[in-house]
Image (tube, helix red, strand yellow):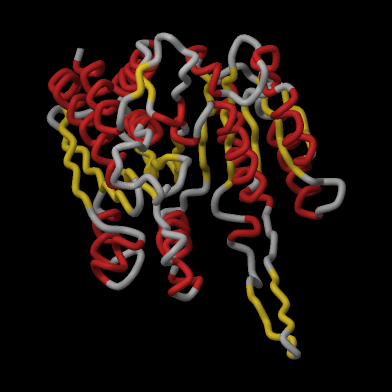
Amino acid sequence: MSQSQSLKLAALAGDGIGPEVMREAIKVLRAVENKHGKKFGFSIEITEAPVGWAGIDAAGKALPDATLALCKQSDAILFGSVGLPDRDPTIPKEERPERAALLRLRKEFGLFANLRPVVLSKALAHACPLQPDRQGDGIDILVVRELTGGMYFGRPKETTDLGDGKKKAVDTMVYTTDEIARIAHVGFRAARLRRKKLTSIDKANVLENGVLWRDVVTAVAKEYPDVTLEHMFVDNGAMQLMLKPTQFDVMLCENMFGDILSDEAAALAGSLGMLPSASLGQTTGEKTFGVYEPAGGTAPDIAGKNLANPIAQIASAALMLQYSFGLNEAGVAVHNAIAKVIADGLRTGDIYSAHDAKARKVGTSEMGDAIATAVAG
Protein backbone atom coordinates (compact mmCIF):
# COMPACT_ATOMS: atom_id res chain seq x y z
CA MET A 1 0.00 0.00 0.00
CA SER A 2 1.30 3.42 -0.93
CA GLN A 3 1.94 6.01 1.76
CA SER A 4 -0.96 8.13 3.00
CA GLN A 5 -3.57 6.32 0.94
CA SER A 6 -7.18 7.34 1.56
CA LEU A 7 -9.48 4.31 1.58
CA LYS A 8 -12.99 5.24 0.51
CA LEU A 9 -15.83 3.46 2.26
CA ALA A 10 -19.55 3.75 1.57
CA ALA A 11 -21.44 3.03 4.80
CA LEU A 12 -25.06 2.08 4.09
CA ALA A 13 -26.75 1.46 7.44
CA GLY A 14 -30.25 0.74 6.16
CA ASP A 15 -33.23 -0.06 8.35
CA GLY A 16 -34.14 -1.38 11.80
CA ILE A 17 -31.05 -2.02 13.88
CA GLY A 18 -28.81 -1.15 10.93
CA PRO A 19 -27.98 2.42 12.04
CA GLU A 20 -27.18 1.29 15.61
CA VAL A 21 -24.77 -1.50 14.67
CA MET A 22 -23.23 0.57 11.87
CA ARG A 23 -22.43 3.31 14.39
CA GLU A 24 -20.43 0.82 16.45
CA ALA A 25 -18.60 -0.54 13.41
CA ILE A 26 -17.56 2.97 12.40
CA LYS A 27 -16.41 3.58 15.97
CA VAL A 28 -14.15 0.51 15.73
CA LEU A 29 -12.86 1.53 12.30
CA ARG A 30 -11.84 4.90 13.73
CA ALA A 31 -9.93 3.06 16.46
CA VAL A 32 -8.21 1.00 13.75
CA GLU A 33 -7.34 4.15 11.84
CA ASN A 34 -5.85 5.78 14.94
CA LYS A 35 -3.86 2.68 15.88
CA HIS A 36 -2.70 1.43 12.49
CA GLY A 37 -3.15 4.34 10.09
CA LYS A 38 0.27 5.92 10.53
CA LYS A 39 2.03 2.57 10.68
CA PHE A 40 0.62 1.39 7.34
CA GLY A 41 0.06 4.77 5.72
CA PHE A 42 -3.68 4.92 5.35
CA SER A 43 -6.75 6.86 6.38
CA ILE A 44 -10.37 5.79 6.05
CA GLU A 45 -12.80 8.15 4.36
CA ILE A 46 -16.28 7.08 5.48
CA THR A 47 -19.36 8.47 3.72
CA GLU A 48 -22.80 7.44 4.93
CA ALA A 49 -25.79 7.18 2.60
CA PRO A 50 -29.39 5.91 2.81
CA VAL A 51 -30.51 2.53 1.51
CA GLY A 52 -33.59 0.35 1.97
CA TRP A 53 -36.63 2.05 3.44
CA ALA A 54 -34.33 4.85 4.53
CA GLY A 55 -33.57 5.32 0.82
CA ILE A 56 -37.25 5.21 -0.10
CA ASP A 57 -38.06 7.82 2.53
CA ALA A 58 -35.17 10.03 1.45
CA ALA A 59 -35.26 9.71 -2.32
CA GLY A 60 -38.18 7.54 -3.37
CA LYS A 61 -36.35 4.26 -3.99
CA ALA A 62 -34.47 1.62 -2.04
CA LEU A 63 -31.18 2.30 -3.81
CA PRO A 64 -31.12 6.04 -4.54
CA ASP A 65 -29.08 7.21 -7.52
CA ALA A 66 -26.79 9.23 -5.23
CA THR A 67 -26.16 6.17 -3.05
CA LEU A 68 -25.28 4.02 -6.05
CA ALA A 69 -22.97 6.76 -7.37
CA LEU A 70 -21.21 6.88 -4.00
CA CYS A 71 -20.74 3.11 -4.06
CA LYS A 72 -19.15 3.29 -7.51
CA GLN A 73 -16.69 5.88 -6.23
CA SER A 74 -15.76 3.81 -3.17
CA ASP A 75 -13.27 1.01 -2.53
CA ALA A 76 -15.79 -1.07 -0.58
CA ILE A 77 -19.31 -1.01 0.84
CA LEU A 78 -20.12 -1.65 4.48
CA PHE A 79 -23.79 -2.60 4.48
CA GLY A 80 -26.20 -2.82 7.39
CA SER A 81 -29.56 -4.46 6.73
CA VAL A 82 -32.71 -3.59 4.81
CA GLY A 83 -36.39 -4.40 4.86
CA LEU A 84 -39.25 -3.71 7.25
CA PRO A 85 -41.89 -6.47 7.23
CA ASP A 86 -44.70 -4.08 8.20
CA ARG A 87 -43.95 -1.72 5.33
CA ASP A 88 -42.76 -4.08 2.60
CA PRO A 89 -46.27 -5.14 1.49
CA THR A 90 -47.12 -1.50 0.71
CA ILE A 91 -44.98 -1.44 -2.45
CA PRO A 92 -44.54 -3.80 -5.45
CA LYS A 93 -42.22 -6.79 -4.91
CA GLU A 94 -39.62 -5.53 -7.35
CA GLU A 95 -39.32 -2.23 -5.46
CA ARG A 96 -38.79 -3.76 -2.03
CA PRO A 97 -35.36 -3.22 -0.46
CA GLU A 98 -34.10 -6.81 -0.63
CA ARG A 99 -34.58 -6.91 -4.40
CA ALA A 100 -34.19 -3.28 -5.39
CA ALA A 101 -31.18 -2.57 -3.19
CA LEU A 102 -29.29 -5.65 -2.03
CA LEU A 103 -29.76 -7.91 -5.07
CA ARG A 104 -29.13 -4.98 -7.38
CA LEU A 105 -25.85 -4.15 -5.67
CA ARG A 106 -24.73 -7.76 -6.05
CA LYS A 107 -25.54 -7.70 -9.75
CA GLU A 108 -24.22 -4.17 -10.35
CA PHE A 109 -20.78 -4.98 -8.95
CA GLY A 110 -20.59 -8.62 -10.02
CA LEU A 111 -20.41 -9.88 -6.44
CA PHE A 112 -20.46 -13.57 -7.24
CA ALA A 113 -18.79 -14.99 -4.11
CA ASN A 114 -20.22 -14.82 -0.60
CA LEU A 115 -17.99 -15.89 2.28
CA ARG A 116 -19.62 -16.52 5.63
CA PRO A 117 -17.35 -17.73 8.46
CA VAL A 118 -19.13 -19.62 11.25
CA VAL A 119 -17.01 -19.86 14.40
CA LEU A 120 -18.18 -20.97 17.81
CA SER A 121 -16.08 -19.46 20.57
CA LYS A 122 -15.42 -21.73 23.55
CA ALA A 123 -16.72 -18.94 25.75
CA LEU A 124 -20.07 -19.14 23.94
CA ALA A 125 -20.47 -22.91 23.99
CA HIS A 126 -23.60 -22.44 26.10
CA ALA A 127 -25.26 -20.46 23.28
CA CYS A 128 -24.90 -23.27 20.75
CA PRO A 129 -28.07 -25.37 20.44
CA LEU A 130 -26.01 -28.56 20.18
CA GLN A 131 -24.83 -30.61 23.12
CA PRO A 132 -21.12 -30.21 24.02
CA ASP A 133 -20.23 -33.64 22.62
CA ARG A 134 -21.38 -32.48 19.15
CA GLN A 135 -19.31 -29.29 19.38
CA GLY A 136 -16.04 -31.21 19.64
CA ASP A 137 -12.99 -29.02 20.09
CA GLY A 138 -14.79 -26.14 18.42
CA ILE A 139 -16.77 -25.28 15.30
CA ASP A 140 -15.02 -23.44 12.48
CA ILE A 141 -16.78 -23.53 9.10
CA LEU A 142 -16.48 -21.29 6.06
CA VAL A 143 -19.55 -21.32 3.80
CA VAL A 144 -18.67 -20.23 0.24
CA ARG A 145 -21.87 -19.37 -1.63
CA GLU A 146 -22.31 -18.51 -5.31
CA LEU A 147 -24.22 -15.23 -5.29
CA THR A 148 -25.28 -14.07 -8.76
CA GLY A 149 -26.73 -17.18 -10.40
CA GLY A 150 -29.19 -19.93 -9.64
CA MET A 151 -32.85 -19.54 -8.80
CA TYR A 152 -32.58 -15.98 -7.46
CA PHE A 153 -31.53 -14.59 -10.85
CA GLY A 154 -32.66 -17.21 -13.39
CA ARG A 155 -35.27 -16.39 -16.01
CA PRO A 156 -38.15 -16.79 -16.46
CA LYS A 157 -39.17 -15.54 -13.02
CA GLU A 158 -42.83 -14.65 -13.01
CA THR A 159 -46.31 -15.13 -11.61
CA THR A 160 -49.10 -15.57 -14.15
CA ASP A 161 -52.87 -15.52 -13.73
CA LEU A 162 -54.54 -18.78 -14.76
CA GLY A 163 -58.05 -17.48 -14.23
CA ASP A 164 -60.71 -18.61 -11.78
CA GLY A 165 -58.61 -17.11 -8.96
CA LYS A 166 -55.67 -19.42 -9.67
CA LYS A 167 -52.08 -18.42 -10.35
CA LYS A 168 -48.82 -20.04 -11.40
CA ALA A 169 -45.40 -18.95 -10.07
CA VAL A 170 -42.17 -19.83 -11.87
CA ASP A 171 -38.58 -19.47 -10.69
CA THR A 172 -35.79 -20.85 -12.86
CA MET A 173 -32.57 -22.39 -11.53
CA VAL A 174 -29.80 -21.78 -14.06
CA TYR A 175 -26.03 -22.29 -13.95
CA THR A 176 -23.29 -22.30 -16.55
CA THR A 177 -19.95 -24.08 -16.50
CA ASP A 178 -18.07 -20.80 -16.09
CA GLU A 179 -20.22 -19.64 -13.17
CA ILE A 180 -19.66 -22.91 -11.31
CA ALA A 181 -15.93 -23.02 -12.03
CA ARG A 182 -15.46 -19.43 -10.88
CA ILE A 183 -16.96 -20.03 -7.43
CA ALA A 184 -15.29 -23.43 -7.15
CA HIS A 185 -11.86 -21.79 -7.48
CA VAL A 186 -12.78 -19.40 -4.66
CA GLY A 187 -13.74 -22.35 -2.46
CA PHE A 188 -10.62 -24.37 -3.17
CA ARG A 189 -8.32 -21.40 -2.63
CA ALA A 190 -10.02 -20.73 0.70
CA ALA A 191 -9.64 -24.40 1.70
CA ARG A 192 -5.92 -24.24 0.97
CA LEU A 193 -5.57 -21.54 3.62
CA ARG A 194 -7.56 -23.54 6.17
CA ARG A 195 -7.70 -27.31 6.80
CA LYS A 196 -7.61 -28.33 3.13
CA LYS A 197 -11.03 -29.94 2.90
CA LEU A 198 -13.92 -28.86 0.70
CA THR A 199 -17.46 -30.24 0.80
CA SER A 200 -19.44 -29.42 -2.34
CA ILE A 201 -23.20 -29.27 -1.83
CA ASP A 202 -25.64 -30.16 -4.62
CA LYS A 203 -28.78 -32.11 -5.49
CA ALA A 204 -27.33 -34.08 -8.36
CA ASN A 205 -29.73 -36.98 -7.86
CA VAL A 206 -32.73 -34.98 -9.11
CA LEU A 207 -31.56 -31.63 -10.56
CA GLU A 208 -29.85 -31.19 -13.94
CA ASN A 209 -27.89 -28.18 -12.69
CA GLY A 210 -26.81 -30.34 -9.73
CA VAL A 211 -25.26 -32.84 -12.14
CA LEU A 212 -23.41 -30.04 -13.93
CA TRP A 213 -22.35 -28.53 -10.59
CA ARG A 214 -20.83 -31.84 -9.46
CA ASP A 215 -19.08 -32.45 -12.79
CA VAL A 216 -17.52 -28.97 -12.92
CA VAL A 217 -16.41 -28.96 -9.26
CA THR A 218 -14.82 -32.38 -9.77
CA ALA A 219 -12.90 -31.07 -12.78
CA VAL A 220 -11.70 -27.94 -10.94
CA ALA A 221 -10.57 -30.09 -8.01
CA LYS A 222 -7.83 -31.57 -10.20
CA GLU A 223 -6.06 -28.20 -10.00
CA TYR A 224 -5.98 -28.48 -6.19
CA PRO A 225 -4.56 -31.94 -5.43
CA ASP A 226 -3.70 -30.85 -1.88
CA VAL A 227 -7.39 -30.25 -1.05
CA THR A 228 -9.69 -33.17 -0.21
CA LEU A 229 -13.01 -32.95 -2.06
CA GLU A 230 -16.24 -34.60 -1.02
CA HIS A 231 -19.71 -34.26 -2.54
CA MET A 232 -22.85 -34.16 -0.40
CA PHE A 233 -26.54 -33.80 -1.20
CA VAL A 234 -28.04 -30.65 0.30
CA ASP A 235 -30.56 -32.49 2.48
CA ASN A 236 -27.82 -34.63 3.98
CA GLY A 237 -25.66 -31.54 4.38
CA ALA A 238 -28.38 -29.87 6.44
CA MET A 239 -28.64 -32.93 8.64
CA GLN A 240 -24.89 -33.32 9.06
CA LEU A 241 -24.58 -29.70 10.20
CA MET A 242 -26.66 -30.66 13.21
CA LEU A 243 -25.24 -34.15 13.76
CA LYS A 244 -21.52 -33.47 13.31
CA PRO A 245 -20.65 -29.89 12.31
CA THR A 246 -16.96 -30.40 13.10
CA GLN A 247 -16.59 -32.56 9.97
CA PHE A 248 -16.87 -29.46 7.77
CA ASP A 249 -14.11 -27.06 6.79
CA VAL A 250 -15.23 -25.25 3.61
CA MET A 251 -18.77 -25.78 2.32
CA LEU A 252 -19.20 -24.85 -1.36
CA CYS A 253 -22.82 -24.09 -2.28
CA GLU A 254 -24.92 -22.69 -5.10
CA ASN A 255 -27.00 -19.61 -4.34
CA MET A 256 -30.19 -20.93 -2.75
CA PHE A 257 -28.57 -23.88 -0.96
CA GLY A 258 -25.87 -21.56 0.39
CA ASP A 259 -28.47 -19.07 1.60
CA ILE A 260 -30.31 -21.75 3.58
CA LEU A 261 -27.33 -23.71 4.89
CA SER A 262 -25.33 -20.65 5.93
CA ASP A 263 -28.26 -19.43 8.04
CA GLU A 264 -28.59 -22.89 9.56
CA ALA A 265 -24.87 -22.98 10.27
CA ALA A 266 -25.08 -19.50 11.78
CA ALA A 267 -27.22 -20.91 14.58
CA LEU A 268 -24.23 -22.99 15.64
CA ALA A 269 -22.37 -19.83 16.62
CA GLY A 270 -25.10 -19.00 19.10
CA SER A 271 -26.67 -16.02 17.34
CA LEU A 272 -27.01 -14.40 13.93
CA GLY A 273 -25.61 -11.35 15.69
CA MET A 274 -22.20 -13.03 15.67
CA LEU A 275 -21.99 -13.78 11.94
CA PRO A 276 -20.28 -11.48 9.40
CA SER A 277 -20.15 -11.98 5.65
CA ALA A 278 -18.21 -10.77 2.63
CA SER A 279 -19.66 -10.62 -0.88
CA LEU A 280 -16.80 -10.32 -3.32
CA GLY A 281 -16.30 -9.61 -7.02
CA GLN A 282 -13.31 -10.07 -9.27
CA THR A 283 -9.89 -9.08 -7.97
CA THR A 284 -8.23 -6.22 -9.84
CA GLY A 285 -4.54 -5.96 -9.04
CA GLU A 286 -4.35 -6.12 -5.26
CA LYS A 287 -7.93 -4.92 -4.69
CA THR A 288 -11.13 -6.92 -4.38
CA PHE A 289 -14.32 -4.89 -4.34
CA GLY A 290 -16.87 -6.18 -1.88
CA VAL A 291 -20.03 -5.59 0.11
CA TYR A 292 -19.64 -6.51 3.78
CA GLU A 293 -22.72 -7.12 5.87
CA PRO A 294 -23.94 -8.96 8.97
CA ALA A 295 -25.84 -12.19 8.48
CA GLY A 296 -28.86 -11.12 10.52
CA GLY A 297 -31.79 -8.94 9.51
CA THR A 298 -33.21 -5.59 10.54
CA ALA A 299 -34.81 -6.88 13.79
CA PRO A 300 -37.28 -3.97 14.00
CA ASP A 301 -38.66 -5.29 17.30
CA ILE A 302 -35.45 -4.29 19.11
CA ALA A 303 -34.44 -1.31 16.97
CA GLY A 304 -33.58 1.83 18.90
CA LYS A 305 -33.43 0.03 22.25
CA ASN A 306 -29.64 -0.45 22.56
CA LEU A 307 -30.17 -4.23 22.54
CA ALA A 308 -28.73 -5.32 19.19
CA ASN A 309 -25.48 -7.26 18.98
CA PRO A 310 -23.04 -5.20 16.87
CA ILE A 311 -20.40 -7.93 16.59
CA ALA A 312 -21.52 -9.22 13.17
CA GLN A 313 -21.33 -5.69 11.74
CA ILE A 314 -17.94 -5.06 13.36
CA ALA A 315 -16.57 -8.40 12.18
CA SER A 316 -17.82 -7.60 8.67
CA ALA A 317 -15.74 -4.42 8.82
CA ALA A 318 -12.76 -6.57 9.81
CA LEU A 319 -13.28 -8.74 6.72
CA MET A 320 -13.40 -5.56 4.65
CA LEU A 321 -10.04 -4.46 6.04
CA GLN A 322 -8.58 -7.81 5.01
CA TYR A 323 -10.17 -8.50 1.61
CA SER A 324 -10.76 -5.07 0.05
CA PHE A 325 -8.15 -2.91 1.78
CA GLY A 326 -5.36 -5.48 2.08
CA LEU A 327 -4.90 -4.64 5.77
CA ASN A 328 -4.72 -8.15 7.15
CA GLU A 329 -2.98 -7.18 10.39
CA ALA A 330 -5.60 -4.53 11.12
CA GLY A 331 -8.41 -6.96 10.35
CA VAL A 332 -6.92 -9.60 12.62
CA ALA A 333 -6.61 -6.96 15.36
CA VAL A 334 -10.38 -6.41 15.18
CA HIS A 335 -11.11 -10.14 15.27
CA ASN A 336 -8.79 -10.47 18.27
CA ALA A 337 -10.49 -7.55 20.02
CA ILE A 338 -13.86 -9.24 19.58
CA ALA A 339 -12.45 -12.47 21.00
CA LYS A 340 -10.97 -10.60 23.98
CA VAL A 341 -14.24 -8.86 24.83
CA ILE A 342 -16.13 -12.16 24.65
CA ALA A 343 -13.49 -13.87 26.79
CA ASP A 344 -13.83 -11.03 29.32
CA GLY A 345 -17.50 -11.92 29.69
CA LEU A 346 -19.30 -9.08 27.90
CA ARG A 347 -22.58 -10.26 26.37
CA THR A 348 -25.46 -8.65 24.54
CA GLY A 349 -28.81 -10.24 25.31
CA ASP A 350 -28.75 -12.71 22.41
CA ILE A 351 -25.61 -14.46 23.73
CA TYR A 352 -26.13 -13.92 27.46
CA SER A 353 -26.67 -16.75 29.92
CA ALA A 354 -27.47 -16.27 33.58
CA HIS A 355 -25.70 -19.58 34.24
CA ASP A 356 -22.37 -18.07 33.21
CA ALA A 357 -20.94 -16.48 36.35
CA LYS A 358 -18.45 -14.46 34.32
CA ALA A 359 -21.02 -13.02 31.92
CA ARG A 360 -22.11 -9.39 32.10
CA LYS A 361 -25.00 -8.18 29.97
CA VAL A 362 -24.26 -5.02 28.02
CA GLY A 363 -25.98 -2.94 25.36
CA THR A 364 -25.06 -2.23 21.74
CA SER A 365 -23.01 0.89 22.45
CA GLU A 366 -21.14 -0.60 25.40
CA MET A 367 -20.14 -3.63 23.35
CA GLY A 368 -18.88 -1.35 20.58
CA ASP A 369 -16.97 0.80 23.08
CA ALA A 370 -15.29 -2.28 24.57
CA ILE A 371 -14.18 -3.61 21.17
CA ALA A 372 -12.88 -0.21 20.09
CA THR A 373 -10.96 0.08 23.36
CA ALA A 374 -9.47 -3.40 22.84
CA VAL A 375 -8.36 -2.42 19.33
CA ALA A 376 -6.80 0.79 20.61
CA GLY A 377 -4.97 -1.07 23.37
Residue 296 appears left or right of 44:
right
- Based on the displayed image, in which of its 4 quarters is residue 6 positioned? top left
- The residue drawn where x is 63% and y is 44% is 260
- The residue drawn where x is 52% and y is 43% is 113
In this rendering, the answer to whether 278 lies above or below 39 is below
Indicate the position of residue 236 as horizontal and vertical percent values: 79, 35
Observer-nearest residue: 21 or 366? 366
Indicate the position of residue 176 as horizontal and vertical percent values: 67, 55
Residue 251 appears left or right of 216:
left
Furthest-front residue in view? 354
- The residue drawn where x is 38% and y is 33% is 309
Examine the rendering and report whether any part of residue 286 can be seen: no
In this rendering, the answer to whether 200 lies above or below 327 is below
Examine the rendering and report whether any part of residue 33 can be seen: yes
Furthest-right residue in view? 205
Q: In the rendered image, which quarter contains the N terminus?
A: top left
Indicate the position of residue 361 as horizontal and vertical percent values: 35, 23
- The residue drawn where x is 20% and y is 12% is 377
Residue 11 appears left or right of 91:
left
Residue 307 appears left or right of 184:
left
- Based on the displayed image, in which of its 4 quarters is residue 365 positioned? top left
Indicate the position of residue 120 as horizontal and vertical percent values: 53, 20
- Based on the displayed image, in which of its 4 quarters is residue 194 positioned? top right
In this rendering, the answer to whether 8 lies above or below 192 is below
Total labels: the figure holds 0
